[in-house]
Amino acid sequence: MIYFIPTPIGNLDDISVRSLKLLTECKTLFCEDTRITKRLLSLLAQRHNVTFQIQNFISMHSHNEETVLASIDKKIFEEHVGYLSDAGMPGISDPGAALVRFCQANALAYEILPGANAALLAYVTSGIKTHQFLFYGFLSHKGMDRQNELFEVLNAPYAVIVYESPHRIEKLIEELAQFAPNRQIFAIKEATKLYEKRFFGTALEVQKASKTANLKGEWVVVITPEIKHGGEAITKEDLIDLDLPPKQKAKLLSKLTGESIKEWYTKLQN
């Protein structure tokens, strides 16, 4: 049996009793990063006075999943085996899905344990008045892909949850303030950790508050859906005014209006 075991996203006490029990029974662990997992187990052992008997740590992350699974000896699954991502629920913007598919394809018994998840924590903490939301994960780092994805997020009919790194959170807040200045957003960094920090307000208000804040840490941002009556949608004029190459601008305008990219490109040249 293989168990997919969520790990704390910050506070070590968020590990479940069941997760600790199973970890003491596992002889093999698949880990996103073996160094992080070994450090976590050491801290958990001290905090909760337990002893782990892990004999085999197997590094398996987004860059080597298929290679590892192609060469694995299936006999190891005759005993309890665990999979841990670095933090939170495996398979949510973390590796794990490939191992689930491997278990399905090879008729191997597996179980997903419930546990810590930063996206759901942020959504509930935000207090946003909607029962529907979309988890988007990480936006692309740059270029046209990022522009398109941000455009989709801001025009989604639901609240949208995105993850962001400390290196790009300032950029994301600036983009939100530029394209949807009056949109309500909630941002939380280092959730459940000692230096957890929350921001709530319009994109412009959050941008102002963040100017003097320490932005180091992992972020979750919840973006409210556009309010149709009196809310601001991205218009053709907004896109036309963007400082982008005509080809990129034409792609965005095509997505908004349904007209072809070629038609918009021709209009922008005139």
Image: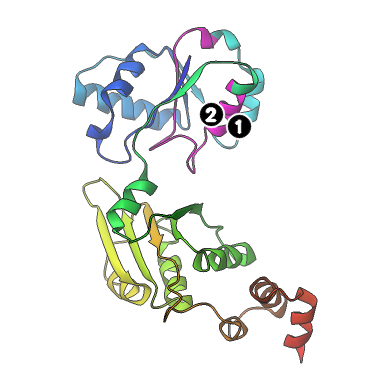
Horizontally, is 147 left or right of 255 in the view? left
Res 41 → quadrant: top left
Q: Nearer the viewer, residue 132 or 202?
A: 132
- At mark 2, the secondary structure is loop
Residue 45: horizontal and vertical position, in percent?
Answer: 25, 21
Q: Is residue 99 magenta?
A: yes
**Residue at 25% from the left image edge and 39% from the top image edge:** 11
Quadrant location of the C terminus?
bottom right
- Secondary element type, mark 1: loop
For disc 2, the marked residue is: 60
Separation of residues labelled 2 and 1 (CA atoms)? 6 Å
* 151 in the magenta segment: no
Question: Could you tell me the amino acid type at mark 1?
Answer: Asn
For this view, does 184 lie left or right of residue 58? Answer: left
Q: Residue at x 60, y 27 (%)?
A: 101
User: Cβ–Cβ below 8 Å for labels 2 and 1?
Assistant: yes
The residues colored magenta run 76-103
Give the percent coordinates (x, y) of residue 198. Answer: 26, 59
Image point (57%, 15%), residue name: 108
Within 10 angstroms of label 2, few (less than 14), some, or many (20 or more) residues? Answer: many
**Residue type at mark 2?**
Met
- Image position of 232 with respect to 184: above or below: below
Report the front residue among 149 and 84: 149
Image position, residue 36 (x, y; %): 39, 32
Horizontally, is 207 left or right of 102 in the view? left
Q: Relative to 196, does residue 108 appear above or below in the rendering?
A: above
What label does residue 2 carry, if any?
none
Residue picked out by circle 1: 64
Percent across and percent down for residue 260 are: 77, 74
> What is the count of numbered marks?
2
125 to the left or right of 231: left
